[in-house]
Image (cartoon, rainbow, N blue to C red):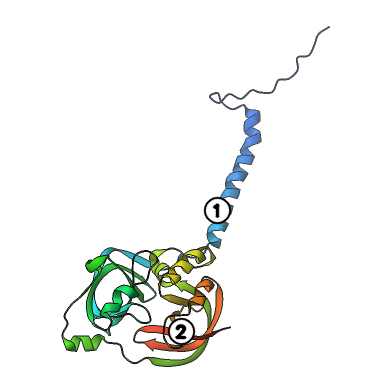
Protein backbone atom coordinates (compact mmCIF):
# COMPACT_ATOMS: atom_id res chain seq x y z
CA UNK A 1 0.00 0.00 0.00
CA UNK A 2 1.43 3.37 -1.02
CA UNK A 3 1.52 6.34 1.36
CA UNK A 4 0.99 9.91 0.20
CA UNK A 5 3.85 12.19 1.30
CA UNK A 6 2.42 15.13 3.24
CA UNK A 7 2.94 18.52 1.58
CA UNK A 8 5.74 20.40 3.22
CA UNK A 9 5.64 24.17 3.87
CA UNK A 10 8.41 26.04 2.06
CA UNK A 11 11.26 26.79 4.42
CA UNK A 12 12.52 30.37 4.18
CA UNK A 13 16.27 30.94 4.35
CA UNK A 14 17.43 34.54 4.44
CA UNK A 15 20.07 34.22 1.75
CA UNK A 16 17.88 32.17 -0.62
CA UNK A 17 15.18 33.66 -2.86
CA UNK A 18 11.87 33.98 -1.01
CA UNK A 19 9.38 31.23 -1.82
CA UNK A 20 6.63 32.51 -4.11
CA UNK A 21 3.95 31.48 -1.67
CA UNK A 22 5.45 33.75 1.01
CA UNK A 23 6.01 36.57 -1.47
CA UNK A 24 2.38 36.51 -2.62
CA UNK A 25 1.25 36.69 1.01
CA UNK A 26 3.61 39.41 2.19
CA UNK A 27 3.56 41.78 -0.80
CA UNK A 28 0.09 43.30 -0.21
CA UNK A 29 0.77 43.53 3.54
CA UNK A 30 4.04 45.39 2.94
CA UNK A 31 2.34 47.78 0.51
CA UNK A 32 -0.44 48.48 3.02
CA UNK A 33 2.09 49.20 5.80
CA UNK A 34 4.05 51.62 3.59
CA UNK A 35 0.91 53.48 2.50
CA UNK A 36 -0.46 53.66 6.06
CA UNK A 37 2.89 54.95 7.36
CA UNK A 38 2.99 57.67 4.70
CA UNK A 39 -0.58 58.76 5.44
CA UNK A 40 0.03 58.69 9.20
CA UNK A 41 3.20 60.76 8.86
CA UNK A 42 1.42 63.32 6.69
CA UNK A 43 -1.46 63.62 9.17
CA UNK A 44 0.92 64.10 12.11
CA UNK A 45 2.94 66.72 10.23
CA UNK A 46 -0.22 68.57 9.20
CA UNK A 47 -1.43 68.64 12.79
CA UNK A 48 1.77 70.09 14.25
CA UNK A 49 1.86 73.68 15.47
CA UNK A 50 3.65 75.97 13.01
CA UNK A 51 7.16 76.79 14.32
CA UNK A 52 6.68 80.47 13.60
CA UNK A 53 8.84 83.05 11.84
CA UNK A 54 11.24 83.80 14.69
CA UNK A 55 14.90 84.16 13.72
CA UNK A 56 17.98 83.82 15.92
CA UNK A 57 20.89 85.31 14.00
CA UNK A 58 24.21 83.47 14.11
CA UNK A 59 26.70 86.32 14.04
CA UNK A 60 27.31 88.95 16.74
CA UNK A 61 25.50 92.29 16.52
CA UNK A 62 26.55 95.61 18.08
CA UNK A 63 24.24 98.52 18.92
CA UNK A 64 24.94 101.92 20.45
CA UNK A 65 22.08 103.79 22.05
CA UNK A 66 20.29 104.83 25.23
CA UNK A 67 19.38 102.01 27.60
CA UNK A 68 16.46 101.67 30.01
CA UNK A 69 15.90 99.20 32.85
CA UNK A 70 12.16 99.66 33.47
CA UNK A 71 9.83 97.93 33.15
CA UNK A 72 12.17 95.57 31.29
CA UNK A 73 15.69 96.03 29.97
CA UNK A 74 15.70 97.64 26.51
CA UNK A 75 17.77 99.97 24.39
CA UNK A 76 16.76 102.67 21.91
CA UNK A 77 19.03 102.65 18.87
CA UNK A 78 19.21 104.50 15.55
CA UNK A 79 17.38 102.82 12.69
CA UNK A 80 19.79 101.39 10.12
CA UNK A 81 17.53 102.57 7.29
CA UNK A 82 17.45 106.14 8.59
CA UNK A 83 13.93 105.99 10.00
CA UNK A 84 12.70 106.51 13.55
CA UNK A 85 14.79 104.94 16.33
CA UNK A 86 14.11 101.28 17.14
CA UNK A 87 13.59 99.59 20.49
CA UNK A 88 15.51 96.39 21.19
CA UNK A 89 14.61 94.26 24.21
CA UNK A 90 17.63 93.02 26.18
CA UNK A 91 18.11 89.69 27.95
CA UNK A 92 21.01 87.72 29.37
CA UNK A 93 22.10 84.24 28.35
CA UNK A 94 19.89 81.38 29.47
CA UNK A 95 16.52 82.05 31.08
CA UNK A 96 17.41 85.42 32.61
CA UNK A 97 16.46 89.00 31.97
CA UNK A 98 19.03 91.79 31.87
CA UNK A 99 17.53 94.34 34.27
CA UNK A 100 20.31 93.89 36.84
CA UNK A 101 22.99 94.51 34.22
CA UNK A 102 21.22 97.48 32.70
CA UNK A 103 20.15 99.13 35.98
CA UNK A 104 23.41 101.01 36.73
CA UNK A 105 23.27 102.59 33.23
CA UNK A 106 19.55 103.43 33.15
CA UNK A 107 18.87 106.37 30.83
CA UNK A 108 22.48 106.60 29.67
CA UNK A 109 24.31 105.82 26.43
CA UNK A 110 25.89 102.38 26.18
CA UNK A 111 27.23 99.94 23.61
CA UNK A 112 25.68 96.47 23.65
CA UNK A 113 26.71 93.36 21.78
CA UNK A 114 25.28 89.88 21.42
CA UNK A 115 23.02 87.78 19.23
CA UNK A 116 19.86 89.18 17.67
CA UNK A 117 16.41 87.59 17.78
CA UNK A 118 13.49 88.93 15.79
CA UNK A 119 9.91 88.14 14.90
CA UNK A 120 7.16 90.21 13.33
CA UNK A 121 9.07 93.45 13.83
CA UNK A 122 9.96 92.88 17.50
CA UNK A 123 13.72 92.86 18.20
CA UNK A 124 15.69 91.35 21.07
CA UNK A 125 19.39 91.08 21.86
CA UNK A 126 20.89 88.37 24.04
CA UNK A 127 23.82 90.16 25.66
CA UNK A 128 27.31 88.70 25.57
CA UNK A 129 29.04 88.22 28.91
CA UNK A 130 30.90 90.98 30.76
CA UNK A 131 31.87 94.33 29.29
CA UNK A 132 31.85 92.76 25.82
CA UNK A 133 28.08 92.65 26.14
CA UNK A 134 27.44 96.05 27.73
CA UNK A 135 29.66 99.04 28.44
CA UNK A 136 29.11 102.82 28.81
CA UNK A 137 30.03 105.13 25.95
CA UNK A 138 29.94 108.83 25.16
CA UNK A 139 27.36 110.20 22.74
CA UNK A 140 26.65 113.80 21.71
CA UNK A 141 23.74 115.23 23.67
CA UNK A 142 21.74 115.82 20.50
CA UNK A 143 22.03 112.15 19.55
CA UNK A 144 21.09 111.08 23.06
CA UNK A 145 18.03 113.32 22.94
CA UNK A 146 16.89 111.73 19.66
CA UNK A 147 17.09 108.27 21.26
CA UNK A 148 15.27 109.03 24.48
CA UNK A 149 11.77 107.75 25.10
CA UNK A 150 8.86 109.89 24.07
CA UNK A 151 5.64 110.09 26.11
CA UNK A 152 3.43 107.04 25.68
CA UNK A 153 0.56 107.36 23.20
CA UNK A 154 -2.67 105.80 24.44
CA UNK A 155 -4.73 103.78 21.97
CA UNK A 156 -7.57 103.23 24.42
CA UNK A 157 -8.97 100.37 26.46
CA UNK A 158 -9.06 96.89 24.96
CA UNK A 159 -9.84 93.29 25.79
CA UNK A 160 -7.66 90.84 23.90
CA UNK A 161 -7.52 87.05 23.74
CA UNK A 162 -4.24 85.26 23.15
CA UNK A 163 -1.36 83.42 24.75
CA UNK A 164 1.21 84.76 27.21
CA UNK A 165 4.66 83.80 25.93
CA UNK A 166 8.21 84.44 27.05
CA UNK A 167 9.62 86.80 24.47
CA UNK A 168 13.05 85.18 24.13
CA UNK A 169 11.81 81.76 23.08
CA UNK A 170 8.93 83.16 21.02
CA UNK A 171 11.18 85.51 19.06
CA UNK A 172 13.44 82.70 17.91
CA UNK A 173 15.34 80.96 20.71
CA UNK A 174 12.97 77.97 20.49
CA UNK A 175 10.79 76.58 17.72
CA UNK A 176 7.99 76.49 18.46
CA UNK A 177 8.34 79.05 21.24
CA UNK A 178 4.77 78.76 22.44
CA UNK A 179 1.98 76.30 23.07
CA UNK A 180 1.28 73.77 25.80
CA UNK A 181 4.42 71.75 25.14
CA UNK A 182 6.49 74.87 25.87
CA UNK A 183 4.70 75.85 29.09
CA UNK A 184 7.38 74.63 31.52
CA UNK A 185 10.13 76.51 29.70
CA UNK A 186 8.01 79.65 29.37
CA UNK A 187 7.21 79.75 33.09
CA UNK A 188 10.90 79.48 34.02
CA UNK A 189 11.87 82.19 31.52
CA UNK A 190 9.22 84.59 32.76
CA UNK A 191 10.19 84.00 36.39
CA UNK A 192 13.80 84.67 35.42
CA UNK A 193 12.93 88.14 34.12
CA UNK A 194 12.40 87.54 30.40
CA UNK A 195 9.86 90.15 29.20
CA UNK A 196 6.34 88.70 28.69
CA UNK A 197 4.47 89.12 25.44
CA UNK A 198 0.86 88.48 24.58
CA UNK A 199 0.60 86.74 21.21
CA UNK A 200 -2.93 87.77 20.31
CA UNK A 201 -5.13 85.64 18.10
CA UNK A 202 -5.03 88.28 15.36
CA UNK A 203 -1.21 88.04 15.23
CA UNK A 204 -0.49 91.24 17.17
CA UNK A 205 2.28 91.12 19.77
CA UNK A 206 1.89 93.15 22.97
CA UNK A 207 4.55 93.77 25.59
CA UNK A 208 2.74 93.14 28.88
CA UNK A 209 3.06 95.38 31.93
CA UNK A 210 1.15 96.03 35.12
CA UNK A 211 -1.64 98.60 35.17
CA UNK A 212 0.90 101.17 36.40
CA UNK A 213 3.38 100.42 33.62
CA UNK A 214 5.74 98.31 35.75
CA UNK A 215 6.65 94.64 35.34
CA UNK A 216 3.70 92.28 34.93
CA UNK A 217 2.47 90.65 38.15
CA UNK A 218 4.37 87.36 38.62
CA UNK A 219 1.04 85.54 39.11
CA UNK A 220 0.65 85.63 35.35
CA UNK A 221 3.81 83.53 34.89
CA UNK A 222 1.80 80.41 35.70
CA UNK A 223 -0.73 81.32 33.00
CA UNK A 224 1.87 81.14 30.23
CA UNK A 225 1.00 78.98 27.21
CA UNK A 226 -2.71 79.04 28.07
CA UNK A 227 -5.57 80.67 26.22
CA UNK A 228 -6.26 83.85 28.18
CA UNK A 229 -8.42 86.97 27.93
CA UNK A 230 -6.75 90.15 29.18
CA UNK A 231 -8.20 93.62 29.61
CA UNK A 232 -6.26 96.83 29.88
CA UNK A 233 -5.03 99.94 28.14
CA UNK A 234 -3.11 99.70 24.89
CA UNK A 235 -0.26 102.17 24.42
CA UNK A 236 2.51 102.80 21.94
CA UNK A 237 5.86 103.27 23.61
CA UNK A 238 7.59 104.64 20.55
CA UNK A 239 7.66 101.53 18.29
CA UNK A 240 6.55 99.02 20.95
CA UNK A 241 2.88 98.08 21.40
CA UNK A 242 2.15 97.70 25.13
CA UNK A 243 -0.84 96.30 26.99
CA UNK A 244 -1.06 97.64 30.54
CA UNK A 245 -3.04 94.82 32.10
CA UNK A 246 -5.84 95.82 34.45
CA UNK A 247 -7.67 92.49 34.74
CA UNK A 248 -7.93 88.93 33.52
CA UNK A 249 -11.33 87.72 32.35
Residue at the far top in the pictured view:
1
Distance CA(mark 1)–CA(mark 2)? 44 Å
Among the 4 quarters of the image, the one containing residue 150: bottom left
Q: Secondary structure at mark 2?
A: loop
Which residue bears the numbered disc 2? 210
Q: Quadrant of the C terminus?
A: bottom right
41 or 175, nearer to the observer? 175
Tell me if I can see residue 229 in this picture.
yes
Tell me if I can see residue 54 in this picture.
no
The numbered mark, 1 or 2, whose residue comes first in the sequence reads: 1
Q: Secondary structure at mark 1?
A: helix
139 or 50, nearer to the observer? 139
Residue at the far right in the pictured view:
1
What residue lies at 53% left-to-right and 73% top-to-bottom? 223
Q: Is residue 84 left or right of residue 26?
A: left
* Position of residue 60 measured from the top left corner of the image (x, y, whole percent): 25, 65
Nearer to us of marks 1 and 2 is 2
What residue lies at 19% left-to-right and 86% top-to-bottom? 143
What residue lies at 55% left-to-right and 26% top-to-bottom? 14
Which residue bears the numbered disc 1? 41
Among the 4 quarters of the image, the one containing residue 174: bottom left
Q: Quadrant of the N terminus?
A: top right
* Position of residue 113 measured from the top left corner of the image (x, y, whole percent): 25, 69
Q: Is residue 207 left or right of residue 82?
A: right
154 or 50, nearer to the observer? 154
The residue carrying pointer 1 sits among few (fewer than 14), some (14 to 19) or many (20 or more) residues within 10 Å by Cα, namely few
* Position of residue 92 measured from the top left corner of the image (x, y, whole percent): 33, 68
Amino acid sequence: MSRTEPERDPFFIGWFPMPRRYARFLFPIACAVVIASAIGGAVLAWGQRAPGSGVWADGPVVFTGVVYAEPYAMIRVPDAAGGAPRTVLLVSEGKLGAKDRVGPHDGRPVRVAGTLLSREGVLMLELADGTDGLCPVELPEAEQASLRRRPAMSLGAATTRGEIVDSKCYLGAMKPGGGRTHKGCAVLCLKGGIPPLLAARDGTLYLLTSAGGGPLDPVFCERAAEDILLSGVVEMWDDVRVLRVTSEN
